[in-house]
Image (cartoon, grey):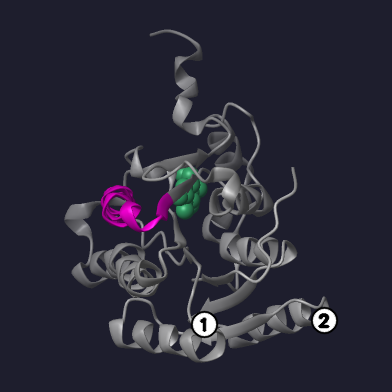
Amino acid sequence: MEIRLDGKRALITGANSGIGAAIAKELASVGAKVAVNYISHPETAEQMVADLKNQGKEAIAVMADISDHVQVEQMFSRLDDEWGGIDILINNAGIDGVKSDTWESELDEWQKVININLIGSFYCARQALKRMVPQKNGVILSTSSVHELIAWTGHSAYTTSKAGLSMLTKTLAQEAAPYGIRVLALAPGAIKTTINQDVWNNQAGLDDLLDKIPLKRIGEPSEVAKMAVVLVSDVASYVTGRTIFVDGGMTDYPDFAHGG
Ligand code: BGC
C-alpha cells in the first residue's frame, strides 16, 4: 500500500520546529502542498520552504499567531489566494507552558497556554471548516498529547488544553461528518524535541522518563509524522472523532507491570 497526497493543500501550524516540522516534511514527501505556519524564527521556516522547493515540492511559509483570530483569518485568506483553499489542517502549534503549581501560577501564563493550544486550534479549525464544508471534503488533525488523559503536576493549563482539544475533536467530527470531513487528534508521548529537552538531556530526567515508557525509548518526531500521514490519508477513511496515541505505551501505565 502506498500513500499519496498529490495536490492536497495542507496547513501545518507550528511547523518550523519539532513535530510540526516533521509532519510538514512527511506530508510534502507524499506529494502534498504544505503551508509552514510559524510565529518565531522566520529563518527556519524560510529554510524549510527553500529545502522543500529544492526537492521539487510546493511549499510556502505563513507567519501567524494562531491565538489571534484576525491573524488566523489572514492566514487562511492567504491560502485562498495561493491555492484556492485547504484540504488538510494540522493543528499542531502548542506550548507546555511554565511549570508551576496552579495556586502559584501567573494568570497570564495559564491563559497563554489555553489561548495557543486550545483556542488557537479552534480558530484554525473554524476557518478550515468554513472552507471544507462547502467542498464536502477535508481532514483536520490536531496534535494532542498523552496529557489529554494523564494528569501532570505543574502543567494544569497544558493538560486542560489537551483534554479540551480531545472534546473539540469529537464534537467537530460529529458536526462535520455529514459533509464527508474527518476530524482526529494524535497524542504523542515523549518525543525528542526541544519542548522536553530539559528532561531528556540529563541522566536523571531521562531515567525517570524511560520508566514511564514501556518501549523504553523516547520517540522520534518522524514516528509521529508518519502516523499523521496515515491518519489524513484515505488509509484512515473510516476513522474520525478519536485521538490516536503514539506514545510507546505510556498510556498503558507501565507501573502496573508489577503489583496492583
Ligand atoms: C509534552 C512533553 C512531555 C510528554 C510526556 C508531551 O505532551 O509536550 O514535554 O515530555 O508529553 O510527558
Q: Where is residue 120 in the image (x, y as percent from the top left)?
A: 33, 70
The image's mark for residue 15 is none
In the structure shown, which secondary structural element does the residue marked by tag 2 occupy? helix
Looking at the image, residue 36 sits to the left or right of residue 114; the answer is: right
User: Which of these two is toward me, 3 or 28?
Assistant: 3
Residue positioned most to the top: 259
Question: What residue is drawn where x is 32% and y is 44%?
Answer: 153
The answer to which image quadrant residue 148 occupies is top left
What span is colored magenta in the figure? 157-184
Q: Quadrant of the N terminus?
A: top right
The image's mark for residue 40 is 1
The amino acid beneath tag 2 is: Asn
The amino acid beneath tag 1 is: Ser
Looking at the image, residue 37 sits to the left or right of residue 47; the answer is: left
Residue under circle 2? 54
Label 1 environment density (alpha carbons within 10 Å; few <14, some 14–19, many ≥20) = few
The answer to which image quadrant residue 225 occupies is bottom right
Mark 1 sits near ligand 1, with its Cβ under 8 Å away: no
Question: What residue is drawn where x is 24% and y is 68%?
Answer: 111
